[in-house]
Image (cartoon, grey):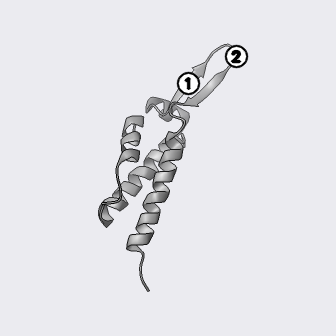
Amino acid sequence: MNINTARSICAQSVGDMNYEKLLKHRVKVIDAWINSRAEYGFNEAVRNGFYVEIASESASGYSPKDLWLTRNLGERLSEVEALLQKKYARQD
């Protein structure tokens, strides 16, 4: 998954999704969130555009390309999970 796909996933409206679409969207959000946190490794994150490599005389390492993307994906994940809980929770 690349950064543009993650941004588009984050921008999709979830309020009108049915149960099946909401579950599929939840999986996509989780995958995008994991990618944005470089949990598959920094080389993968750089290749997919989530991070940029910094190499200079005074610093080296990796920096997020979009500082807010991980936070926004986390909030979207919470929103999807709350919606699933509210609309589709089992009534025992």
Amino acid on which the number 2 mark rests in the picture: Ser
* Mark 2, other Cα within 10 Å: few <14 / some 14–19 / many ≥20: few
Residue at mark 1: 53
Which residue is pictured at 49% across the width and 34% down the height? 45
Q: Secondary structure at mark 1?
A: strand
Tell me the quarter of the picture where residue 39 sits. Answer: top right
Judging depth in this view, the residue of 36 and 11 nearest the camera is 11
Amino acid on which the number 1 mark rests in the picture: Glu
Query: Residue farthest to the top?
Result: 57
Distance between mark 1 and mark 2 Cα atoms: 14 Å
The disc, 1 or 2, on the residue closer to the chain's N-terminal end is: 1
Q: Position of residue 34 (x, y in %)?
A: 50, 46
Q: Position of residue 53 (x, y in %)?
A: 55, 24
Mark identifier at residue 58? 2
Q: Position of residue 89 (x, y in %)?
A: 42, 75
Q: Please say if 70 is above or below 52.
A: below
